[in-house]
Amino acid sequence: MIRAILITLLSVVSIQNLSAQRTIPLDTIHWQINAQTYNFENYKGKDAIYMRGGLAILKDTEFLNGTIEFDVFLTERQGFPGIRFRAVDGGNMESFYLRAHLPGKPDANQAAPVINGITPWQLYFGPKYSFPYHYNYDAWTHIKLIVKDDKAQLYLDHAQRPNFSWRLVRKPETGSVAIGGGGQAPMHYANFRINKDAHEIIDFKVTERTPIEGLIPEWEISSMFKEQELNDISGLKQLINSRKWLGKVQVEEGTAANIARVANLPQNRPANTVFAKITIRSDKNQLKLFEFGYSDRVVAILNGQPIYKGTNNWRSRDYRYLGTVGLFDAIYLPLKKGNNTLLLAVSENFGGWLVTGKFPNPSGLTFK
């Protein structure tokens, strides 16, 4: 009797384990396909989905910790195949994707959160969030992702040790899972599996980023408006006075504040601009150098007067220019004694809605 019970229990455990690791068919029964185009076919010996410009979202599955595996057949065309996970809604999740067209480059791939619809890779960049890898364009590439609480590791092509480890930005929350990516280059995906019981993290080593010293620690963010409203300088005062203030955003990664934390960029993006504000109290009339960064475009306004306009978006300066944020611009601010209001009108397309700045010599200044 006892032996029969044990055999039954072992059978149940075995069935559950096989179920946890089984390949999930790529079809419209198991997946919701939100892509420009897609097709189901047998490709290079595997039942696959061929998909361009979108995502396949796994139905009826909630994921927090565990292992996700799948295969992708890469091409040298510009594309961003990858995995979205812990998606609490359509605009908030974690992600990892390959830049299939950049083999061997330091940014051959990207780990990044998605925050209010924006994937801010222009903030989460460098060896902390990507690694060089030479991709194979003649065979399937195997991707294995292991997630445990605030840690994630990636294994490529059945590696025995992790190729890459990173710390997840968003707090751990259960959410959905999707495969696919942006760009116009279609890719084949196959052999998708999830095992929620397998979440062992080994040899967890991450690269730390050196913070920029002396940054303005937080910025107050206004309600959104259309970027073209900045073209009429005569209406600037009314534009400023009509804003509501959404809250403050703090510097992240020791580099910049993420405006998307409080401003949700709409998909059709008629309003893609906010004011980021600081108040500078000066102990006298003086000229002070202010170094700053932004993404994607900016108009700087001091005490109601526009004094600077700049562009820092992807490919704005040459075909490989990334638009990553840093202290790449500077202006001399004619500060009056007492309170001065500095507004940076920051406009966003994609890649990160960001603002940062510092005074190299802050003597005689306080901020709020």
Image: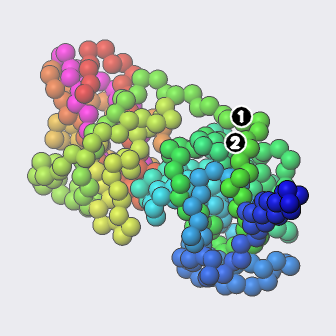
The residue shown at (17%, 50%) is 243
> Is 102 one of the magenta-colored residues?
no
Q: Quadrant of residue 73?
A: bottom right
| Separation of marks 2 and 1 at Cα, in angstroms | 6 Å
- Asked if one can make out residue 133 in the rendered structure from this viewpoint, the answer is no
> Is 285 one of the magenta-colored residues?
yes
Nearer the observer, 304 or 62: 62
Q: Is residue 37 left or right of residue 226?
A: right
The residue shown at (46%, 23%) is 213
- What secondary structure is the stretch in magenta mostly built from? strand
Q: Quadrant of residue 186?
A: bottom right
Q: Which residue is mark 2?
A: 165
- Magenta span of residues: 277-300
Residue lying farthest to the right in this orientation: 3
Amino acid at dot 1: Lys
Q: Quadrant of the N terminus?
A: bottom right
Q: Which residue is mark 1?
A: 205
The residue shown at (38%, 35%) is 250
